[in-house]
Image (spheres, grey):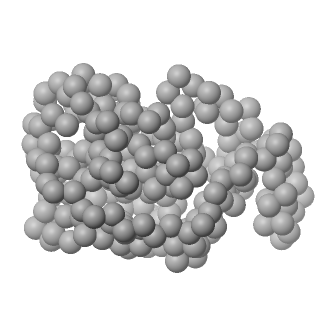
Amino acid sequence: MHGFALDKPNKFKHNYPSLRETPAAGGTAILCVMEHREPGGIVMHRLMQTHGRAMDRMAWTRSWYRDLGFEIKVPVPDVSDVEYERRKSLEIPQAMFYRPATNEVDYESFMKTVGEGDQWSVIDPDKRKLVGWELAEVGYWFWADVSAESPRRFMTWYGLNASIRLPTIEEYASFWHAHLLATGVRLDLRGGTWLKTRYGQGAIGMNGVGPTFYVHRADRIDLLAELAGGRAVEVIANAA
């Protein structure tokens, strides 16, 4: 990754629950029916007709966080089945992910839970002071590019940041692990990807290392990066 200060990768400690994503035929998931027998059931029933994929994803995500030890409420994203399939079939495919509020799941706790607790971004107080953390007052859904290799290479960080909304370090950590569990695909193994998050006058980048990812610090963000690209993210409104 051009301009990144490469540290020795950490040993990966696998700590995932035995959970897999099971697509629902026609966008209707029986799991969602069972999950939403509560006041407002009529609204949920109507959502099932148009937002089955989103409701299935919501149930999967809530179960994933629960298995990691985080009991949180996850809203239904306002994404129709048609839009879900359209994004999935783009030239640069996208998938939905959820970032909880920071007071529910903070970066350090999440990283420790998924076996990434010995990365410098968790344990080094001096380096952590230089990270431009972005706290989330409320949880939110977002789309993220999920091509195996990061797209939009041969651009500077400045060029990428001006043309798309790059993921933050908090968003990337969560969707990298969620995507691995849901699909078995480890993102960015053949190169890095820039993040929106600043590191002093530089920025943060990520790339896959063996079975996990590693957080890099980059000082030169004005150079064209042949081995680093940029993933686009887009915040999604809630349906209910």
**Left or right of 239, for residue 44:** right
Of 58 and 158, the residue lying toward us = 58
Picture layout, residue 5 above or below residue 118: above
Picture layout, residue 37 above or below residue 52: below
Name the residue at 60% across, 66% down: 18
**Left or right of 236, for residue 125:** left
Name the residue at 27% across, 53% down: 214
Q: How many marks?
A: 0
Q: Quadrant of the N terminus?
A: top left
Of 78 and 10, the residue lying toward us = 10
Q: Quadrant of the C terminus?
A: bottom right
Name the residue at 13% across, 62% down: 127
Percent of width and height locating residue 74: 62, 63
Percent of width and height locating residue 93: 54, 31
Q: Quadrant of residue 194?
A: top left
- Can residue 190 be seen? yes
Q: Quadrant of residue 30?
A: bottom right
Percent of width and height locating residue 81: 74, 38
Of 40 and 76, the residue lying toward us = 76
**Left or right of 174, for residue 65:** right
Picture layout, residue 84 above or below residue 142: above
Name the residue at 64% across, 57% down: 20
Percent of width and height locating residue 239: 70, 50
- Can residue 202 be seen? no
